[in-house]
Image (cartoon, rainbow, N blue to C red):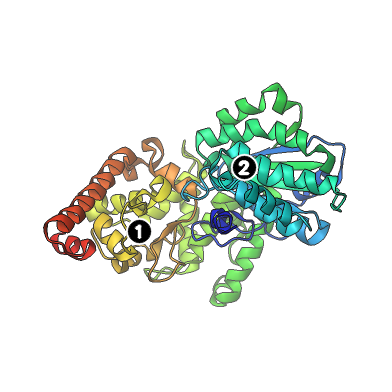
Amino acid sequence: MDKFQRLVVVSALHDGYRIDDYTEECHPATRARILEEMTTWVKQSKVPPILWFSGPAGAGKTAIVRSTCSILQDELNVPFAAFFFWKADSGRNTLQHLPATIAHQLYQSVRGLRPFIEQSINDDPMLLDRSFQKQMEKLVIDPLLALHVAGSITTHRIIILFDGLDECDADGQRQLLRFLPHLCSQLAPLLIGCFIATRPESSIYAEFQHPKLAAISVAKKLEASENDIKLFLIAEFEEINARHPYLRKKYGKWPSAEEFDILVKKSSGFFICPKTAIRYIDSSGKGLRPDDRLRIVVSAFAVDSWHEPIDKLYLAILNQHAPMADLECFKRRLGLLCLPALLWRSMAFEIDTHRQVSIVFQETLEDLRDSLLDLQSLFSLDGGTESAPLLNHSTFRDFLFSSRRSLEFYVDDQALHMEVVSKHLNHLYKQKFCELSFGLPPAQEAQQLS
């Protein structure tokens, strides 16, 4: 069981600690209709076992899945397991850790299941090195069926949730979606239900068109909700006003009705834009106060153009804080932090974060963090002074690596990939050279040679 526990990815759990993803549950009173639909689907037995929920990046899918987990746990008392995919986390961007992570949660919530899982592992010591399908059979399907046959299972419904499947590699997406009909068929006596939240990717859509999957699934699109955006903004501005009493003394009512309406309208009914705006307005730096920052945000939305609202916001933030005299260095720094799978941190050698930053960014970790103090609406510095900044939302990565969208701030991610790989290889070469030629500790001598 030691190896089994090591394969469990805590950050993939609904309440797991994630240093690269700060998505919370739905804001109180928002998404009420959607969460009610989810609750109804869970309670009903004669419904398709698979619910596919799709929506654009930043629409609030992860928040809905997290809220659903809380409802299952706190209100409905329904056993469930969840896996939150994330492209930048090597433990969450493939299916390698999914079977063990799902099985771990199930034996936590289904009484009496653990001995059957342990028996599967004892019967086949190589099980945890076998295929995804084999592991799901022996860690999830067989133990649940054995518990059911023994008459020891008391639950009448089990839910498995997959958030952000589009963040998984393409092969993993196909494997999981093609395995689900078998999973639902085998566990039909337990009324298994699978909730899947993804972006509306064409490859995923194609898989759901297959007769086997289409026959047992229902698709729903996350609709925009202007009313939910209003509720969110009202609550957030109340919090900002409470922390900055001068705002009401100066303006009477802040923000103005006109400013508020602009934020609501330009949100397009989805949360990524207003959440990014609030994060920027509520931050500090360069002597800008919340009312100053609100004016910057509103001015970015004031003129209609071909840009999407979130693109306008990102451009406004970058134009306000980018050092135009050293723009290329600024862009390179942002690009490195946005590389998929955090390539610059996926080193093939063991060195601490300070050394990683020094090699790849060519500056100290302290300087890197200081350079982003005014960009905390885009990057999180919450990990502490010993941690590298982390991207708040993948929509900024998509924006930065698109020349059509980011304009003068465009970063060529392919060229950046090549640069980072070159630095990795160069450092590895120095390590090996020092080890063979001098017999010195590689990390120490490589640092001297660097």
Q: Point out residue 257 in the picture as x, y percentages from the top left corner.
A: 62, 58
CB contact under 8 Å: marks 1 and 2: no
Query: Is residue 326 rendered to the left or right of residue 267?
Result: left
Query: Callout 2: helix, strand or loop?
Result: helix
Q: Is residue 34 above or below residue 173?
A: below
Residue toward you, 420 or 248:
420
Q: Earlier in the sequence, mark 1 or mark 2?
A: 2
Q: Which mark, by number, is residue 321? A: 1
Which residue is rendered at x = 40% and y = 61% of the image?
389
Q: Which residue is mark 2?
A: 135
Q: Give amino acid for label 2.
A: Gln
Which residue is rendered at x = 68% and y = 55% of the image?
105
Work out whether residue 308 can be spotted: yes
Residue toward you, 181 or 73:
181
Q: Are there few (<14), some (14-19), or many (20+) residues within 10 Å of tag 1?
A: some
Residue toward you, 203 or 262:
203
The CA distance from mark 1 to mark 2 is 49 Å
- Quarter-wise, where is residue 177 in the image? top right
Query: Is residue 362 rendered to the left or right of residue 155?
Result: left
Q: Are there few (<14), some (14-19), or many (20+) residues within 10 Å of tag 2?
A: many
Quarter of the figure that contains the C terminus: bottom left
